[in-house]
Amino acid sequence: MTDNQSIIAAQQIKQGPILEVKDLQVDFTTDTGKAVHAVRNSSFSVYPGQWVAIVGESGSGKSTSAMAVLGLLPGTGHVVGGSIKLEGQEIAGLSQKEYDKLRGSKIGLVPQDPMSNLNPVWRIGTQVKEALDANNMDVSKEKRSKLAAALASEDSSVALKGEDDELFVASKDLPALLDAAKAALEKNGVKRVEEEMNYFRDEWVPGSETRWRVAKDLIDAGVKDDEAWAIAKKYVLGSTMEDRIAGLLSEAGLPDAATRARQFPHEFSGGMRQRALIAIGLACRPDLLIADEPTSALDVTVQKKILDHLHMLTDSLGTSVLFITHDLGLAAERAQHIVVMYKGQVVESGPSLEVLQHPQHPYTKRLVAAAPSLASQRIISAKERGENTDALLEHKVAGENELAKSEHIITVEHLTKEFKLPRKKEMFKAVDDVSFSVKRGTTLAIVGESGSGKSTVANMVLHLLTPTSGKITYEGRDTSTFKAKDILDFRRHVQPVFQNPYGSLDPMYSIFRSIEEPLRIHGIGDKKSRSKRVRELLDMVEMPVSVMGRYPNELSGGQRQRIAIARAMALEPDVIVCDEAVSALDVLVQDQVLRLLNDLQAEKGLSYLFITHDLAVVRQIADEVVVMQHGRLVEHATTDEVFDHPQKQYTRDLLDAIPGGKLQLGLD
Amino acid sequence: MGRYLLRRILQMIPVVLGTTLLIYALVFLMPGDPVAAMFGAKPVQPAVAAQIRAEYNLDKPFIIQYLLFLKNALTFNFGKTFSGQQVLAVIGRAFPVTVKLAIMAFVFEAVFGVVFGIISGLKKGKWYDTVILVISLLLISVPTFVTGFVMQYFLGVQWHLLPITAGPNPGFLDLLMPAMVLGSVSMASIIRLTRSEITANIAEDYVRTARAKGMSNKMVVLRHVLRNSLIPVVTYLGADLGALMGGAMISERIFNIQGIGNTLYQAINRGEGTLVVSIVTLMVLIFVVCNLIVDMLYAVLDPRIRYQ
């Protein structure tokens, strides 16, 4: 690989930057005709084979910069100054028609949200085909980037003789090819024929494996050069459109791609859709791929798999990647170069480790401090040095040891929830025999991927779903025996904060009305005292009183989540159930909300049941952790134990998936 | 799909039974004596009246009348009108005229509604978008008979372009103006529906992804914007076909067309229960079948919909 790296370095100097953005300015025009500067004087470059990450919070201009490069600015956005050069050619002022020729073939896109970026009415394969058709791709053979060609020509073991060596295996030729390969192996006296054949079966994917690689595999297995090339030339004759589509999907890590290509997007999980989008983005072998938060909508474990795969794929194709993310840990782990954007400007730019270890700009310092993946790392490193970590875990309530002995406020015993599946006889067990308890004044986190049943548990604890079997006790009383009046009282003491701050506030209610509503429902105080209480609550969540008259759509995600917390706090509850309460927020806001929750806990002695898929967040907030998988409880221990001595493989996988978890930090 | 279809067809039975019973009850409750209405101002001999009552089952209690009607209907015997004609023959004469009118109105509203909707949606904010929007708003807010009279006045009386009324056995030109009047409100709704669907779809993420693939604007609009936008429009159109049959009553009155709407109107005036119920049953059937076709079509157009 060192050889490869030096070749890449040489190519980078020879070819120059593939993308060079200089003093870019992007404006949006408001309804009143005023210009809003979304990006101001931003410059950055991407070199061949390089991953460059743009990091920043939502609204920092990072996505806008990327879309300006693609010529796909939304709405009234337009480039008003600066230059964008692709391979030395100015593209900032191109017409949409001219841009059509660049998009797909020169610059690819892997968009942010896999749920909304595939058209629901077309088959996955059709949507891949569109990309190939739009750029008149020759589907029978591989198209190489300049970098990949340079790398391949330096690879002395295989001499590329011509373009035909890039032809793909076709599915109809594959059986004959495998037979010929087997015969050749036996003839050359190769031992462990079956093992080699199994390797071939895995590797030789129709529509993806090329003739020269088939020849190379055969030679590596022990077949003579001439014979290997003769077989490859006879049976590798170029693929059809269907093969190529399946090959592309399979390269992106989609299993059973030929069948999958005939399915519709709604039959795919989020991770599978993102793989399809990666296949589309790379279908025409662009030199530059723009990956706009490609995994922020996915679970951590899926996120790691997909990014690993994307990394491998772009490395082997020689594609440069402009990687947009709000997670500094993720950026540092994946990219060689980091560009930090803040309020439309590039505030810092440099090699990843340099930026991470010696952040210069105050905003970068805040980002480094806030990134949850990095924060948990900070705690671990402090521990390794034998320092007192309590100072870092600010939320620890004074006299915690005494609290640990106090009674359990919520106890869950053998909780099971079954759902009826359509057209199936057996019931689906969403939650299967789960037991745990929340100690007064502490935080218990339930961690697991989507589908692990963690939200179902939360809904049962909130008395929003009835358990199939098992018992939930609140303050020693079985919640299933509650009458209507008891339930009202229970709701007053156990309050939820839900995942989606956009969905859990009524858009037709003013902020004041949203927060006041629980007080009104429970008939607390008169108009005047309720208004006073709302002011107190807003103060508590550090929001100005002036937002009372505004509506949810005028607030940012973090602000809305604060309002949701204020609403939950209105009735002075004992327990707050947070169902992915910070998952939809970007890191800085996430950090602020977590701190707020910590402070409130310390002040009011609240107990939290915290549902999340993000172990990094758990480290910051939880005292105890319950790990769930497929509805079952996998592991239950204190947070420190789970992080330091995870007992189960699944927990270790989750820990490994925390981005940037193993990076060295410069802040300690 | 097969099981779903069967279930839907079985569901049609109570719907048809319920509506016919309801209509029968309403006709029964109508004020005035149908026998007296038959003779107009002339006095009726009690013996004659009794004979007519017996012939049309008017002397029996309501529920018996209804059950007798059902029994006869099952053997396709819908009885006679007061003037002695077979009900089936009356419907058979009027129905084809209305079908012709409804299909013409349907084609009119579908073609112009979708075309203007697409133009309006793709060129939002242009002057012709505004013009189309204002006209569609006018058509929606003005009652159909006003639209009808205005068109009669200008196209017929003033400019002599089209016949003002249609007589018996109307041809294409006779029905053109009535069809336009009949389809105008739905056309305006389709313009607005198409326009809002296109506006919403063009901002979708998958449209941006399609552009990022390097597809030309024409292809993106065709495959990703229009295809998705027209799904709700097609379902609206399907449901509207049934509504057009019922809605024909007003335009048939205005233009004096001897279709099903006009026949129904006259039958209601005369209190001819059998004829009214027969026509309404037919309309209910058409409506229910149209709705079923729409639901099936929806599953074909949108792969996310699966019936079980």
Image: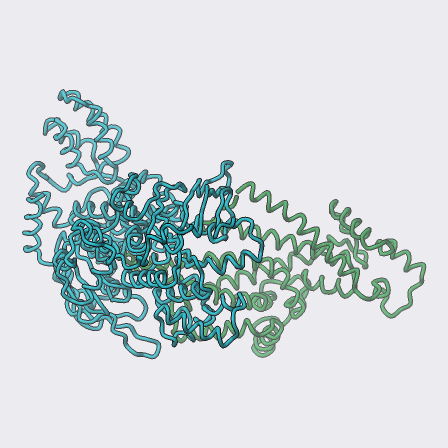
Left or right: residue A505 compared with residue A37: right
Q: Nearer the viewer, residue B24 or A63?
A: A63
Above or below — where is A549 with respect to A225?
A: below
Which chain does the green colour mark? B
Q: Nearer the viewer, residue A591 or B201?
A: A591
* Residue located at (27% from left, 48% from top): A640
Q: Residue A266: x and y, percent?
A: 40, 48
**Residue A129 in sight from this viewpoint:** no
Q: How is the image coloured?
A: by chain
Left or right: residue A4 compared with residue A567: left
Left or right: residue A586 compared with residue B54: left
Colour in which the image shows chain A: cyan
Q: Residue A513: x and y, percent?
A: 47, 71
* Residue located at (36% from left, 74% from top): A544
Above or below — where is B273 with respect to A552?
A: above
**Residue A156 in sight from this viewpoint:** yes
Q: Nearer the viewer, residue B43 or B152?
A: B43
Left or right: residue A10 compared with residue A472: left
Q: Residue A451: x and y, percent?
A: 39, 46
Q: Residue A456: x and y, percent?
A: 44, 48
Q: How many marks?
A: 0
Q: State which quadrant residue A515 falls in.
A: bottom left
* Residue located at (56% from left, 41% from top): B3
Q: Nearer the viewer, residue A132 or A447?
A: A447
